[in-house]
Image (spheres, grey):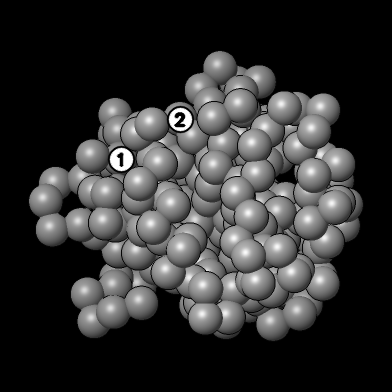
Amino acid sequence: MNSQTQRFSITGAAGSLECALDLPEAPPRGLALVAHPHPLYGGTMDNKVAQTLARAFVAIGYATVRMNFRGVGKSEGMHDAGLGETDDMELLLAHMTQQYPGLPVALAGFSFGTFVQSHLQQRLTEQGRPAERLVLVGSAAGKWAMADVPANTILIHGEQDDTIPLSAVLDWARPQDLPVIVIPGADHFFHRKLQHIKSFVVEMWHR
């Protein structure tokens, strides 16, 4: 993301997993995990939306970590339809909470990454240690079986998303009474609209 990004790896069930950590200038006030879009369609942790989410969390003082899913970049293994990826993200969380104990945890994801993070939050809730809040951008609702998420989730979608239609996201959000922030004119990858994602996260985080 920038020259200060720290690259490291952890060992998961399928092998080594490539990770990237970005730190705020002051001591971190929280820990954020960012999940990237679908590995089989070119998704990586260096995706522009994933990087924008990382920048937003660094701006609000969070130590922010991304991970290449199985089979992406230097990460070993093969795509596991979200199941192994959720396991790997949980492992990354355990690693990071050892490095930064006691900090509140945020989960963020883009596209396929929202599916992973929704299921990780479900696991953490069942364990009695849910993340404080989620940010889901270009939610995978209607494409993959998203888990329900907390009422304070920040849900951002593009008006002209032709990969995951806004109508599918509304159908998923409606039973949960989840507000959806719609970016007018934005496509799935938020071309020329990335600044809105960062602005909404920074402005809404502590509301």
Q: Is residue 9 left or right of residue 12?
A: left
Q: Earlier in the sequence, mark 1 or mark 2?
A: 1
- CB contact under 8 Å: marks 1 and 2: yes
Image quadrant where residue 183 sits? bottom right
Residue 132 image label: 2
Query: Does residue 63 appear in the picture of this structure?
Result: no
Query: Does residue 126 appear in the picture of this structure?
Result: yes
Q: Position of residue 178 (x, y in %)?
A: 68, 33
Front residue (pair 204, 53): 204
Image quadrant where residue 109 sits? bottom right
Q: Residue furthest left?
A: 26
Q: Position of residue 60 (x, y in %)?
A: 27, 49
Residue 10 image label: none
Amino acid of disc 2: Glu
Q: Is residue 199 left or right of residue 13?
A: left
Q: Position of residue 41 (x, y in %)?
A: 76, 80
Q: Which residue is mark 1?
A: 30
Image quadrant where residue 165 sits? bottom right
Q: Position of residue 133 (x, y in %)?
A: 49, 35
Q: Quadrant of the N terminus?
A: bottom left
Front residue (pair 91, 52): 52
Q: Residue furthest front?
A: 184
Q: Quadrant of the C terminus?
A: top left
Mark 2 nearby-residue class (10 Å; few <14, some 14–19, many ≥20): some
Q: CA distance from mark 1 to mark 2?
A: 10 Å
Q: Residue at x 29, y 57 (%)?
A: 58
Label 1, secondary structure: give it: strand
Q: Residue at x 87, y 57 (%)?
A: 143
